[in-house]
Image: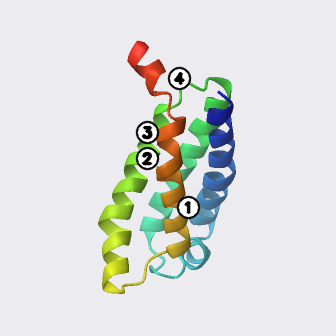
């Protein structure tokens, strides 16, 4: 449970901050979060909405860690998919992409399988 709560706290802090920036100032978010690899479009606000939902569900996860843990599976799937479909091809072809964000995504994809409460899901 401690690992889950730590991940939830990190989600609240990181996803919440990124969501706020993406929703309130997408031009700044394009520069900072996305490393100026993408133009500032409404898609950045859409991503901000996704990250805000992760932050909100993580707040609830502090209260009920197992109940809200599927949000971690969603993160594992979308971050892993983004790394394989967007970041890896961009890296191979020398196309700009958010490298710092990619490093955080890699860390998350490596850590989450050890934090997700697979046994509790199977036994319920």
The relative height of residue 82 versus residue 99 in the rendered view (above or below) is above
Dot placed on the residue nearer the N-terminal end, 4 or 1: 4
Quarter containing the C terminus: top left
> Horizontal placement of 49 versus 81: left or right?
right
Dot placed on the residue nearer the N-terminal end, 4 or 3: 4
> Secondary structure beneath disc 2?
helix
Dots 2, 3 in contact, CB < 8 A: yes
Tag 1 residue: 104
> Horizontal placement of 87 versus 103: left or right?
left
Residue at 35% x, 71% y is 88
> Secondary structure beneath disc 4?
loop
Tell me the CA gap for discs 1 and 3: 16 Å
> Secondary structure beneath disc 1?
helix
Q: Position of residue 12 (x, y in %)?
A: 66, 46
Tag 3 residue: 73
Dot placed on the residue nearer the N-terminal end, 1 or 2: 2
Tell me the CA gap for discs 4 and 3: 12 Å
Tag 4 residue: 67
Quarter containing the N terminus: top right
Residue at 60% x, 40% y is 56
Q: Quick one: which residue is furthest to the bottom in this view?
A: 94
Tag 2 residue: 76
Dot placed on the residue nearer the N-terminal end, 4 or 2: 4
The relative height of residue 52 versus residue 2 in the rendered view (above or below) is below
Dot placed on the residue nearer the N-terminal end, 1 or 3: 3
């Amino acid at each position: 449970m401690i690992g889950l709560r730590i991940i939830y706290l990190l989600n609240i802090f990181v996803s919440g901050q990124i969501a706020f920036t993406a929703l309130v100032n997408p031009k700044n978010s394009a520069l900072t979060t996305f490393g100026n690899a993408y133009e500032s479009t409404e898609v950045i606000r859409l991503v901000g909405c996704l990250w805000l939902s992760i932050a909100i569900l993580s707040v609830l996860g502090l209260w009920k860690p197992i109940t809200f843990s599927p949000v971690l599976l969603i993160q594992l799937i979308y971050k892993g998919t983004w790394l394989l479909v967007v970041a890896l091809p961009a890296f191979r072809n020398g196309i700009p992409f958010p490298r710092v964000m990619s490093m955080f995504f890699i860390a998350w994809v490596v850590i989450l399988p050890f934090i997700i409460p697979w046994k509790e899901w199977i036994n319920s």
